[in-house]
Structure formats: structure tokens, C-alpha cells
Image (cartoon, rainbow, N blue to C red):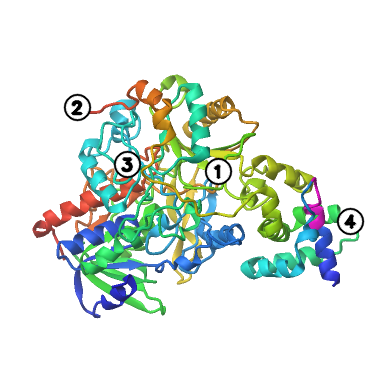
Amino acid sequence: MTVEILAQRNARPGRDEEVDVVIVGAGPSGSVAALHLARAGISVVVLEQGEWPDYDDYTGARPEHELVSTKLWHPNPNVRDNPNDYPVDTSTTDINPLMFAGVGGSATLYGAQWMHFLPSDFRVRSMDGVAEDWPFTYEDLLPYQLEIEREVGVSGLSGDPAFPPRGAYPFPALPIGSVGLRGALGMEKMGWHWWPGSNAIPSEKFGELNPCVRRGTCLTGCPEGAKSTTDRSHWPLALKAGARLITRARVKEVETNDQGLATGVVYIDANGRERRQRAKVVILCANGVGTPRLLLMSGGSSNPDGLANSSGMVGKRLMMHPFASVLASYEDPLDSWRGPFGQQVYSLEFYETDESRGFVRGSKWNCMPSGGPVGVSGAIGSKVYVAEEGRFQDFWGANLHENVARRFGHSLIWGIVGEDLPEESNQVVLSKDLVDSDGLPAPQIVYKVNENSNRLLQFNIDRCLESVRAAGAIETLVSTPVRESGWHLIGTTVMGDDPKRSVVDQWGACHDVPNLYVMDASTFPTSGATNPTATIMAVALRNTQRMIAERRNQKVA
Amino acid sequence: MAKEQAFFALADFLIPAHGEMPKFSDVCTYADVEKSLDFRIDLKEGFARAIATDASTGVEAHLEKINKQDGEAFSAITTVVIATYYMNPRVRALIGYPGQENVQYDSKATQIYLTNGSLGHVVARGRKYRPTPGL
């Protein structure tokens, strides 16, 4: 039975039907919650503002790929301009938030880099005296991380000395290719850490996922159906288990009763009609921008500052991982259009705090191919290496041919992800004048890259240049901080034990509204410096299993 | 026809012949350009402005002007020019680009970094993480 038939069979609930759980968002965390709740016999409805992906729309295997993907599959919703997305007011931010609305969520356009947070990420206050410790530890979360890896179909190589010992990955690591080997060579010359990339891309057939063919278009949708996204890894199973999924359903408000308990949500359907979904429990999985936006839009006149916001922390402490990139070109051919695009190797050499460097916390580096000729030209499409004051002639005419000859097929990119420390001044608020296609207020991002991040990025750029030059680079180009890099939206409904300083408890339950949960990266007290999807899904699984175990004790309206 | 001539003058300035690489108009037709615009209808208005403006001051000065005064038009014409050029099969053959290809591999093959000692050096350098039990 196909996913489409299952989706039709599991029709929309009746007008007055109350379900056990309604989930907002069918991305990584919402999908995990839906699958495991449905398997436990709990009635679940998921509301997703986007649609099912149509894999024929992914252009990676077609000649027009570089032309089309820079619009249709751009990760910035303001550029993509799709009515299923909401616009974001970015007039007050140094970094643009990136996201995608659809079944599978923003992972539709992610690089599938699969990294656990490290032990110290959960203990930054105890170890480094900054921010807050998490309410649980690396060891607490590890069993859930490993279970999620099996559900997702992760490929990788165990034994990395940057992590505590762990079991084998479900699938062998993908080939690291000439790009990965050259990246590793530079690290080896410096005596620094590197490791073959772990990716949410099975190297062999796994369920609905096909083996990766290294097409290298992960960031613009995988036409092979090889990159693991929950439309393939989780939703076929969730639908079979009885979960119901309603697409093109934009939630505008979480409703509560006089006792302050959630009673369901109000959403706008594909036809523009306002509908209500009653539920005993509401779970928000709408990402670090969408979740606080929805809470700020909810609460009515009795909660003018938004729902679940007695702490005043909803929307605050936004973290987006300031990001720098170093492109390095070599004389030798590296076949640098071949994938996987996420990470062929990574390095955690500078992950942990060393106060002699002038900043706290650290970074993760990931080595990627540089892509097709349009992207590496520096002329257009990828504008990250073009200075605002640059002359256009520098990138056109004979210079275009020479830039492409030097870089295309001969270059790699090290991406440098810096840990972002939480600051209350970095936040999501509601725009006063920008609205989405349904007239709901758009989120506005207020965000500045702080001094710690600037120092961190510059230190890492300098080290990265040493590494690529040690491996023979003949040209290097640096971009920092990359404006279009806000992939990781973290921290805006922080978890904690103190209701005066946090929005949710360690299980994702709102202190103010005990049957309202948040299960996306909004709850993370700190950001780590690794790609967060693995941790997002593991925390969602931990919370969901706790919810199932405690279902008889759940307070409901 | 005047529109096409105006366009090719701009396109050939942006992508002239160089070494063994052909200039834009040697390999791309206006039909190719229109096909690109059909893929990116969002660029049509800016593209039309870029080629409609009086270019009597010279091609380079005209491009300089729209780059400074109409970024959307400059972005539209340059995007269409470069994407159309590098979609061309002859150009791809010259630079050795097969497109984003399907590459077969043996997932169980022993990787070279496991046999040449390079990953062994990483392991030999010892633990990198900071343990946290008790914290």
C-alpha cells in the first residue's frame, strides 16, 4: 500500500472528534512523536502547513539543476516565496533563518550530517561556567540516539575518539571521495582530528530509502529518495500504525480552557477555512521560529504576552550557529561535484573549550564538495564569496573562465559551525507589519552575532587556512559569518526545572500548561556545535516514550 | 531581433571566448535563453529590463549601471547567462562536467583510510572528548 493511499484512508477526524494528541509539524521531531504514539495505540493527528514532497520536483539529476534549485529549493523561505511557507522579517538579524514547510520538514533541504552532541554540551555551566547545564546528560540520551539511528538509517564509522565508545552505525560509512581524502590530508599534516562523515543517508537499501548514489544534491532535495527524511523513514510506518496527517493545515492558535489546560488548536485548511482540532494533549514541533511564533500568537486576552510565557522566555535565547566557510582549490582533480554533500569528513579538533584562544566553547568542521560550475564561479548563485564592494568584472569575462577552471572539480569547502551561546536579546518576536498568506503575523528575528562567536570563527578560519594550505591549496576563499546559514533554530522555549526561568520541563511539558508540549530544538538550553537533527529526534523520542509511559497520569482538560 | 542582438552583446561581454572556451553566442541560442527563463519565470521582468535599457554608452558601462542601479535586473541577466552557458553540452564537455551524476560504489569495500594508517593516527592520538560523569 502506498503512502498516498494510506494518507487518504486515514481521513480527517470528524468535526467534533477529540483525539488523544494533536501534533503541529511533520518534521523530524513531530514524525518521531507521531510514529511512537500511534504504535502505542494513542490516537494522533498531525497538522502540517506544507505538503508531501513530490520527488519529481527535485532537479538534481537534470541539466537545469543549478538554475532551478537556487529559487525553487532555496532554504530561505523569503527567497523561495512559496505560499506554504510563512515569510520571516529579517531586517533585524545578522543571520537569516532557513527552513522548509512540508512532510519531512526542514530536513527536506538539509545536508543529512548526523552528529550527536558531545558530553560537554550537556554540562557547559559545570565545565565552562557559561549558560546552563541540561536537565539530563549525554549518557541519559545515548540509548535514544542509537534507537533513532536505526529508524533513520544512518551510515558511519564507529570508533571516533572524539566521542565516548558507542555501538556500530546501522550502515557502513559512505565513500569519502577525493574531496574527503584531501580534507583529511590537511588535517593529518597538522596532526589534527578528523573522521569519516556520519550521515543520515543509508549506503544500502533500507525500507523506503534507496542507497545513496553520490549525486551530491542533498541540499536541494534528494531525487533518489536516498537521503533520510521522515516522509520516507517514519511516515509510511506512522500511517500504517494509524496516525492521521493533514497537510496544508496552518495552525494559528493553541486553545486553552478556564483551567489553563490546552483543549486543541485552531488551523486554516487548504481551502482557507478555519477549523478546530480538539485534543487531550498538544505537541508543538514547528521549529525554533515557528513554535515560539505560535505560542506568541496564542493565549488570548488573558495571556497578552503569549501562551506558556509566565517566565517571559518564549522566543528568547535564539541560537543559530554562526557559520563560516573556507573554499580551497587544488591543482589535482577532486571530482568535487560528487556527493554526499553534507559531510565527507568532519573534525572536532577545536570542539572543546581552551580559554587560551580567547573564547569559550568551540566548533565542528565539515568537509564538503564544492558543487557545479555556477556555484563555484563566485559570480552568482553562490554569492557568499563576493564582497559587497567587489567589482562585477572580477567575476565575469576572462576571470569567469579562469575562476571556473581553477575551482570547478578541484575544490572543497570546509564548513565551520560555531557554538552559539544563548542571549536573551537574540529572539523571535511577532512582526508588526509582515503577515503570511493567511494574514497571520510573521515572525521577526532579532539577532546579533556576539563577540564570542566572532572570535571563535576567526580562530577557526585561521586554523582551517593552515590545514588546507598544508594539503597544497593554491587558492582560498573565506566567508564569515555566512548570512544564509541559519539552519539550526534552537533555544526559544528553553527547558529547565525553574518555571521562572524556563518554558518547559525536561520532558517538554510547559510549566504553565501541563498538557502542552514542545518537542523540537526550541527546548535546548544550549546549542552545542554539531548539527542538531540527531539530538532533536532523540529528545523527541525520549519525551514521547515518557509520555506513553505516564499516559494515565497526564493531566488533561 | 534588436532585443536578441542587445542580449548577445551583453552575454558575450560577460562570457567571452577565452582559451579553448567559446563565447556565449558561439554555443547558446536565444531559444536556450528563453528555455532558461521558462524555468525561472521570476527572472523574466528583471531580464527584460536589463536588455531593454539603452546600451549606447557601451556594454560594460551599461552593465556597470544596472549593477549599481537595478540589482534585480543585473542578477536576472547574469543568472540566466551563466546557467544557460554551463547547461550547454559542449561547454560541459570542455570543462569535464558530466552533471550531478550517479556514481556506483561498493558499500562494503575497505576504505583506503583504514589501510594506509591515516585514520589510525587519529585514533592513536587518543581521546578528544571531555567525560562528564558526576557533573
Seen from the viewer's position, the closer of residues A68 and A74 is: A68
Q: Label 1: how many residues lie within 10 Å, few (<14), some (14-19) or many (20+)?
A: some
- Do the residues at pointers 4 and 1 share their chain? no
Residue at 58%, 57% (x, y): give it.
A70
What's the residue type where badge 4 is placed?
Gly
Could you say whether the residue bearing mark 4 is in a helix, strand or loop? loop
Residues marked 3 and 1 touching at CB (< 8 Å): no
According to the picture, the residue beneath numbered tag 2 turns out to be B134
User: How much space separates mark 2 and mark 3, taking CA atoms?
Assistant: 20 Å
Chain of the residue where label 2 is placed in the rendered structure: B
* Tag shown at residue A355: none
User: How much space separates mark 4 and mark 3, taking CA atoms?
Assistant: 58 Å
According to the picture, the residue beneath numbered tag 1 turns out to be A482
Q: Label 4: how many residues lie within 10 Å, few (<14), some (14-19) or many (20+)?
A: few
Decide whether residue A117 is among the magenta residues.
Answer: no
Q: Position of residue A200 (x, y in %)?
A: 37, 49
Q: Label 2: how many residues lie within 10 Å, few (<14), some (14-19) or many (20+)?
A: few
According to the picture, the residue beneath numbered tag 3 turns out to be A525
- Do the residues at pointers 2 and 4 share their chain? yes
Q: Tell me the quarter of the picture where residue A193 sits.
A: top left
Q: Position of residue B3 (x, y in %)?
A: 82, 70
Q: Which residues are magenta?
A: B11-19
Residues marked 4 and 1 touching at CB (< 8 Å): no
Could you say whether the residue bearing mark 2 is in a helix, strand or loop? loop
Among all residues in the image, which is located at the extreme top? A356
| Looking at the image, residue A61 lies above or below residue B106 | below
Observer able to see residue A243:
no
Is A417 displayed left or right of A303 in the figure?
Answer: right
* Tag shown at residue B58: 4
